[in-house]
Image (spheres, rainbow, N blue to C red):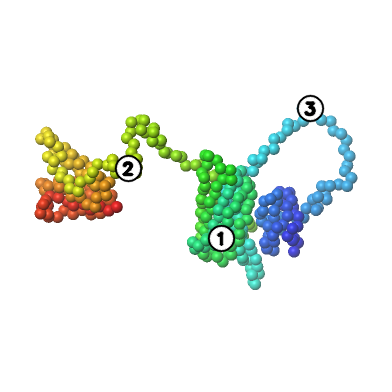
Amino acid sequence: MKYQVGDEILVLHSNEEGRIIEIMNDTMVMIEVRGVKFPAYMDQIDFPYFKRFTEKKLFPEKKAPQKIFVDQIPKEKIQKNDAKEEEGVLLNLIPKFSLDDFNDEIVESIKIYLSNRTRVGYQFVYEQAFSGAVDFSIESTIAPFTDFYIHDIPFASVNDSPSFAIDFSLMEPHKKKAAHFETQLKLKPKQLFQKVEVLKEDNKTTISYPLFETYPDKAEDNHIAIDVLRNAGYKVYDVSKIKQNIQAARSVIDLHIEKIMDQHSHLSNAEILQFQLEEFEKWLELAQLNNLPSMVIIHGVGKGKLKAEIHDLLKVKKGVKQFINQYSDFYGYGATEVFFEY
């Protein structure tokens, strides 16, 4: 084989020098360039010796001094550290190929890399599971614009639907940023097999899954200071003593209008019905706030208008388990018993 682990190489398309850290298969190697590790095909690299030899001449030619005028001197260029384009944080999968007995190319395993393409460093907790059971975990950090090799998984285990859970936090906490951010990814076998085939057809090396583009901001605190409410004239109660400030409930309420108000002769039938329904709503809510198991609503017989309205409301009220309107020795058919669930 042309290359071995540890060989110095030259990346042809970028003219950068690095070294080989792993032989992946007959056509691909893992290289490291300035601290960044990534796979490359062997036809994309070469030994750097020819480049070095052609750049260095034993006897440099002497050049006549060139006149430079003041207006020809270029202004100094500022070298910015943020020349790299941010792409977010990705989980990269790199299939490792080999040849079977029939000389067909097959995938033996998948290398898992975390790729940070942002200007921010992160702490992370990584867990990888098969069929819901955690198989591998690691806690570490990843610097800006670097790739972090995590581990390999056998390609055959893709049938067990591998999932990845990663909890990120900032290496340098910021008061406006979230304390941590968790993201999850679950691979579907059929989709991954298709991606591998496309990878081979396009002559590429990596399957990338974006995890997030920008680390999220801290959630806004919508809490209103109690003193502000109290000073504005609102009544503020201690939640531990809330029941002390709730009106006592009744297990039996009578909705006959004369039981609700003294003067009602001036009211129309529609107005009377409205007052009765408001009284019903009030005592039903108090019964639930006080966790009563049941209550009796006396609505009378009459034309049945009040009973029908109450039954329609009970059908949609949350927390009402059931209600019964049956004959009793006390109310005849003029009362409905309501049962609650909590």
**Judging from the image, what secondary structure is the residue with disc 3 in?**
helix
Measure the alpha-carbon separation of dots 1 and 2: 48 Å
As drawn, is 85 to the left or to the right of 70?
left
Q: Which residue is mark 2?
A: 241
As drawn, is 240 to the left or to the right of 75?
left
As drawn, is 70 to the left or to the right of 287?
right
Q: Are marks 3 and 2 in contact (CB under 8 Å)?
A: no
Which is nearer the eye, 253 or 319?
253
- In percent of width and height, residue 138 lies at 58, 56
Q: Which residue is mark 1?
A: 136
Q: What residue is shown at x 67% (from left), y 51% (from top)? A: 36
- In percent of width and height, residue 259 lies at 13, 41
Query: Where is residue 94, by image quadrant?
Result: bottom right
Above or below 263: residue 91: below
Badge 3 amino acid = Val
Q: Is residue 207 visible?
A: no
Between discs 3 and 2, the one toward the N terminus = 3
Classify mark 2: residues with Cα within 10 Å, few (<14), some (14-19) or many (20+).
few
Measure the alpha-carbon separation of dots 3 and 2: 83 Å
- The label nearer to you, 1 versus 2, is 2
Which is nearer the eye, 228 or 240?
240
Q: What residue is shown at x 66% (from left), y 54% (from top)? A: 38
Between discs 1 and 2, the one toward the N terminus = 1
